[in-house]
Image (spheres, rainbow, N blue to C red):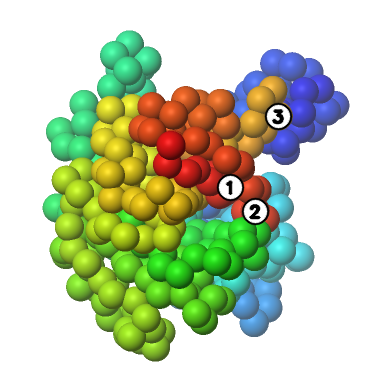
Amino acid sequence: MSSSAKDQGVSPALPPAMQLFFMSEGIVISTALSLAAELGIADLLTDGPRSSQDLARTTSTHARSLHRVMRLLSSVGVFTEVQPSCFALTPLGECLRTGVPGSMRSWVRMVGLKVWLQTFAEALDSLRTGEPAFKHAVGAELFDYLAAHSDAGEIFNAAMSDFGQGVCAAVVQGYDFSGIGKIIDIGGGNGSLITAILQANPLMNGVLFDLPHVSESARQSITAAGLAERCSVVGGDFFDSVPSGGGAYLLRWIIHDWDHDRALTILKNCHGAMPKTARLLLVETVIPPGDEPHPGKLVDFVMLTALGGQERTEKEYDHLLDEAGFHLTRVVPTLSPMSVIEGTPR
């Protein structure tokens, strides 16, 4: 059996046709997970097993229908049926709890947004045109849609924040930031990464740069972290320009969002603002060679269909950075799916 099938949780005893059957039904498991996340089922099981009838009363759902979803998720290890119609958490299910380290609840809620189903239903359009199916299906680009639909936008932002916490810790642990006097976080969002870096490097100063409406909330986060004197917040658009004079320019999960031309624009703007001695630090997923499963290969499909961006191999990053005027010096893996791609201006 291939490693891909094995990592999909498909039994090696099954014939190939049935392996494909189970793989093809991944959307069913994804949908069931998003329902459990939306209802907060894992939080309700924190204190111990509960019956599906009890869970249904608490969540205002139909008891037999909820039992069927719980039974499905128990079959893939998210919950466990300890007695007939009585369910408990497993280590996988613990990750669906709210606010725990490594929580995936917000992420799974985001995956369940209806707009993704609309997008994937039109995915063939991306294969035929190379353009994101999201715009074809929804009539707007992703970030414009999220700005116009606050409920979906809040879920998306919470997912990025929760996932980002683990990435922040892994980046701070995995990359040596010593020797950087001033770091500029381009598209820094709520400031979680630059906060973690500055807290771990008390002699460093920073600048968080993002769109003006994002910058205001980021300023509050920076102040709450006690870093207002060491980290300024600047509003602007990285397609136009970025702040100058940093010792390092940090972009986390930014370049993968955009097509080649727009990614190149961002990188060239950074290059134009950087001293020759500065470092470019891209925190991105780097696609490994070969057939092995990798989170980046899944995210790349989302980039293809939703944004028109892409995940890249090390060689592709090397070419992109070279075109923008950088030399790729090294790729530093972390304990998350993300790596730090380091470059210097030529």
> SS class of the residue under badge 3?
loop
User: Measuring 44% from the left and 29% from the top, which residue is drawn there?
Assistant: 322
Q: Disc 2 and disc 1: Cα gap in Å?
A: 5 Å
Measured in 3D between alpha carbons, the distance from the residue under mark 3 to the one under mark 1, in whole angstroms, is 17 Å
- The label nearer to you, 3 versus 1, is 1
Q: Contact, CB < 8 Å: mark 2 with mark 1? A: yes
Q: Is residue 161 above or below residue 219?
A: above
Q: Earlier in the sequence, mark 3 or mark 1?
A: 3
Residue matched to label 1: 339
Q: Nearer the viewer, residue 122 or 3?
A: 3
Q: Residues within 10 Å of mark 2 (few under 14, many from 20)?
A: some
- Report the quarter where the C terminus lies: top left
The residue indicated by pointer 2 is: 334
Residue depicted at x 65% and y 53%: 334
Q: Secondary structure at mark 1?
A: strand
Q: Residue at x 45, y 52 (%)?
A: 277
Residue named by callout 3:
292
